[in-house]
Image: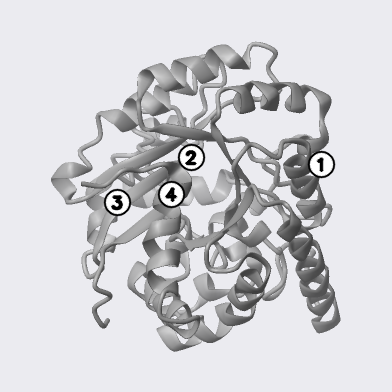
Amino acid sequence: MSELGFSIVDPHIHQWDPRSTPRAVSPLTRLFGRWPGAYRKVANAVMPTSAKDFVGGQSVLFPYLPADYAADTADLSIDTVVHVQAGWEDHSLLGPVGETRWLEQLPFEASGKKLGAIVAQADLRNPRVDETLAAHVAASAKVRGIRHMASRHPGRGVMAWSKLPHLYQDAAFLRGFEKLAARKLRFDAWVYSPQLPDVAELAKRFPETAIVLDHFGSPVGAGGPSGSVGSTAQERNDIIARWREDFARLREHKNVLAKLSGLAMPVIGFGYHKRAAPPSVDELTDTFRPFVSHAIDVFGIERAFFASNFPMDKASAPASHLFGAYIRLARELGEHAPRALLRDNALRFYGIKTT
């Protein structure tokens, strides 16, 4: 990979350890973790099909910590990462703050990375959510924002991350979002593509709050079958056409940026996780180009940035291949695009200072 002349910021990674922190698989880990083979078989038997199809592998069963991320990105010049909330299962009022405290004690520096920012977890529908927000900020100066996932798809077999189909329109959520806005925290919005109008409406309602749309708005089934979605070429064309239209409507909301990530997630439908060999940099570049081109047409190079979504996208491709494609696509966009899309925009959005 040719030299960029600067270090990359990866503004979307996840860390977890089901051995010692509350995760959905933690009970299984405690029972079977000493026997990885048996653990995999039991997990495969009890995990819902939608969950197995979403993760595309069994990475969630085992720890993924700074040393693991450093190994996965050893041939990349990445100096700073942003951790985005990841499946912390203590849902009491202050329970999610445990993830922030846990992240603060992880040895990122020993692995050659800086934890530049934390996007924490909070239930914005909770009438006492401001106490959660205050506790996050008190627990770490790195807390820059919140992600409350809204992703729920009308198609059968697609994993749901919200009980409500239109969480971002919910009155209780909006009251909680007012608390987030008052604290000038940022918001990571994650939806499936049929919910993109909800993000636009949220941005319109809170024009002073910085919002980043995660993972292109996840056009489920755009690359191939995912659950009951995207099973025919015509359906996939329709999914992409609607995604393009709804995504473009975000342009007018100047407080919204796009996180260019997550297209390798199995739920998008490209099926890379099922192949014996991962897609090449050339293949990923060609696959991602139409989505990236549209995103840049909508937002320009100043309102977007690339991210790995590791280890979720690891089921489909190594980090070097993902970033290899990102770098090529950024270079196609002009001389100043690589630094903007791979470093500066993420630093600015998350308010990360470098020395």
Q: Reply above or below: 1 against 81.
A: below
Between circles 2 and 3, the one closer to the viewer is 3
Hey, what amino acid is under mark 3?
Thr
Where is residue 87? Give x, y as percent. Answer: 51, 37
Q: Earlier in the sequence, mark 1 or mark 4?
A: 1
Element marked by disc 1: loop
Q: Earlier in the sequence, mark 2 or mark 3?
A: 3
Q: Are marks 2 and 4 in contact (CB under 8 Å)?
A: no
Q: Colour mode?
A: one colour
Measure the alpha-carbon separation of dots 2 and 1: 20 Å
Between circles 3 and 1, the one closer to the viewer is 3
Tell me what residue is drawn at x 81 percent, y 74 percent.
Answer: 241
Name the residue beneath numbered marker 2.
86
Name the residue beneath numbered marker 1.
165
Hey, what amino acid is under mark 1?
Pro
Name the residue beneath numbered marker 3.
80
Q: Reply above or below: 227 against 147.
A: below
Tell me what residue is drawn at x 47 percent, y 69 percent.
Answer: 316
Left or right side of 318 for 241: right
Tell me what residue is drawn at x 85 percent, y 81 percent.
Answer: 234
Q: Reply above or below: 63 against 121.
A: below
Hey, what amino acid is under mark 4?
Arg
Element marked by disc 4: helix
Measure the alpha-carbon separation of dots 2 and 4: 23 Å
Residue 348's disc is 4
Tell me what residue is drawn at x 44 percent, y 27 percent.
Answer: 22
